[in-house]
Amino acid sequence: MKIGIITESLNRPKTGVELYLSNLLSNFDVKHDIYCINYKKLHLEKFNEYIISNPFKKLFTTLWYPYVIYTLKNTTGFNIIHNPRHFPTIFNLKHSKYIITVHDIFGITLNSKNYETYKKVAYRLLLPKTLKSADKIIAVSENTKNDLIKHFKIPPNKIKVIYNAANETFAKLNEIEISNIKKKYAIDYPFIFYVGGLAAHKNIVRLIESYSKLKMLGVSHKLLLAGVKRYKYNEIFETIEKLNLQKDVVFTGYVPDEDLPGLYNAADLFVYPSFYEGFGLPPLEAMQCGTPVITSNTSSLPEVVGDAGIMVNPYDVDELANKMYEVLTNEDLRKEMSKKGLERAKLFSWKKCAEEHLKVYEEVYTMK
């Protein structure tokens, strides 16, 4: 069986989808002929490479995805084409089976002010045809599967749920390792941690408002926000200034993979109040490091956290502030949450994820 996997995501810093694809490839037991389809060479040792030029260099990279399918639509060389990123691709493949991974459908489920216009248009106008053209859809959570059924009327048997996982480097560290990462980031204070893009749907503004209320209760922790600017982030900085928290909210920018486990370990609490997540990897990474987690009771996040963390209404600033106070002032509760989180994290693994993907490839290959 000859499999082509579109790997354009690996050309960028590793966040969400990029981490998914990187870990998937790393954990494949290569018993099939797998090609990485890209517009530049990645020099991945285990895999062949198939280069399709990118004529849209100065435009949205998303245009390259339908171009790939258009280029391959008459090709007989591949049995399976897997698109791990759910950008609309429009065209049908005549000789290959097509699998697409859907991580979320933000453009349909989120309030219009919380999302980028061009992606909303792509979701509403083009994604339905893309989903129809797929032979199989991989969803990263039951919540995403349910969204696909609800909004696009996809037959349930066309969707396979395969959970993501956290990399094995996310684990409890010793005091020396934690001390080293704190020195690297000039951290000499206790802190609450958040990891993710600075974007409207991540609900960072309400996190900051909750943190302000927490400060009024006498908590001395700072709020450490790790991630890059995504879209509609100006309100975050306006809120910090309005609440006079410039010295208390610390931005790290993008944090490389090798530093994240140390920061999770150094934190007393990880908070992730996102409105919507297709899977929600950061809470799982935090749990795997033994860090107590507070997250939203919405979308896929309850599937990931289970009873190991505390879930709150992401719109309720007072509830979030009170729960943060409860965890930070109760050492026994933090220890209990840490223990439960470590056990919960064992349910997810990239090896299992990769094995289930290969089973889907084999199943689709035999479909008539």
Image: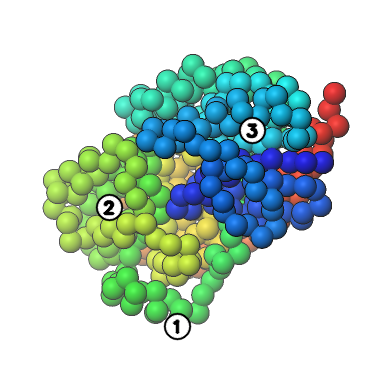
Looking at the rendered image, the disc whose residue lies closer to the viewer, 1 or 3, is 3
Residue 183: % across, % down: 33, 77
Tell which circle, 2 or 3, labels the residue nearer the N-terminal end. 3
Residue in view at x 69 percent, y 53 percent: 47
Q: Which mark is residue 211?
A: 2
Q: Nearer the viewer, residue 357 or 268?
A: 357
**Sequence-wise, which precedes: disc 2 or disc 1?**
1
Q: Quadrant of the C terminus?
A: top right
Near mark 2 (Cα within 10 A), the count class, few <14, some 14-19 or many ≥20, is: many
Q: Nearer the viewer, residue 291 or 177?
A: 177
Calculate the distance from the C-alpha at mark 2 to the C-alpha at mark 3: 39 Å
Q: Nearer the viewer, residue 68 or 294?
A: 68
Quadrant for the N terminus, please: top right
Q: Is residue 63 left or right of residue 362?
A: left
Q: CA distance from mark 1 to mark 3?
A: 43 Å
| Three-letter code, disc 2 | Tyr
Distance of label 2 from label 1 (alpha carbons):
29 Å
Mark nearer the viewer, 2 or 1? 1
Q: Mark 1 touching mark 3, by CB under 8 A?
A: no
Q: Residue at x 17, y 56 (%)?
A: 246
Q: Position of residue 331 (x, y in %)?
A: 43, 69
Q: Secondary structure at mark 2?
A: helix
| Residue 285, above or below 50 | below
At label 3, counting other C-alpha atoms closer than 10 Å, the crowd grade (few under 14, some 14-19, many 20 or more) is: many
* Amino acid found under the numbered disc labelled 3: Ile
Q: Earlier in the sequence, mark 1 or mark 3?
A: 3
- Circle nearer the viewer, 2 or 3: 3
Q: Residue at x 49, y 16 (%)?
A: 125
Question: Mark 1 sits on what residue?
Answer: 176
Q: Which residue is mark 3?
A: 100
Amino acid type at circle 1 is Ile
